Image: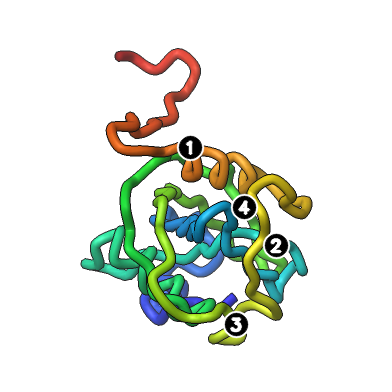
Amino acid sequence: MATPDFVLELREQIGHAPLWLTGVTAVVLRGDKVLLVRRVDNGAFTPVTGIVDPGEEPADAAAREAWEEAGVRVKVERLVWVHALPPMTYPHGDQAQFLDLVFRCVWIVGEPYPADGENTDAAWFPLADLPAMPGDHAERIRLAAAATEGCETRFERSVGAED
């Protein structure tokens, strides 16, 4: 996956130390289908994901990532899930943890293709027949597909967190 310049600059200062980043998942819907991309790094199908740039509005990041990764324009409708992903260590040793913001997006225009080299495929899949996906990607899709007008946003809470 392409690493944003601001992350590379931070890595020059902190090395492989843990880095807290904000990420977005753009669940792009088109009728009863969802856009999935096949990632270069692990070959898995997932919704479009990416890192929010400094000063960027998260919903804008979701729309930007859909355009950059799959060549489709989307309307971001709503935030459906806010959750912290587990800490991760990349093969080269960098450590990171992401606060993931999942957005329901609807397709406007463009036929999906692997636009930026981060993916090897981009295609529409029926919501009722999704391929196997790692982690909680299927849950992200389920929540986004179920989010309708007036739907409450889902905020993840740690066990024992104070209200």
At which x and y percent is residue 66? 45, 71
Spatial distance from mark 1 to mark 2, Cα to Cα?
A: 20 Å
Name the disc covering residue 45, or none.
2
Q: Which mark is residue 146?
A: 1
Residue 24 pos. (x, y %): 43, 57
- Cα distance in 3D space between marks 3 and 4: 28 Å
Instruction: Provide the secondary structure element on which disc 4 rests.
Output: strand
Query: Label 2 is placed on what type of residue?
Result: Phe
Q: Secondary structure at mark 3?
A: loop
Between 152 and 3, the one lying in front of the other is 152
Tell me, yes or no, if residue 109 can be seen here: yes
The image quadrant of residue 147 is top left
The C terminus sits in image quarter: top left
CB atoms of marks 1 and 4 within 8 Å: no
Q: CA distance from mark 1 to mark 3?
A: 26 Å
Question: Callout 4: few (<14), some (14-19), or many (20+) C-alpha neighbours within 10 Å?
Answer: some
Depth check, front residue: 138 or 128: 128
Gap between marks 2 and 4 measured at Cα: 19 Å
Contact flag, marks 1 and 3 (Cβ < 8 Å): no
**On the image, numbered disc 3 is attached to which residue?**
113
Residue linked to disc 4:
88
Q: Earlier in the sequence, mark 1 or mark 4?
A: 4
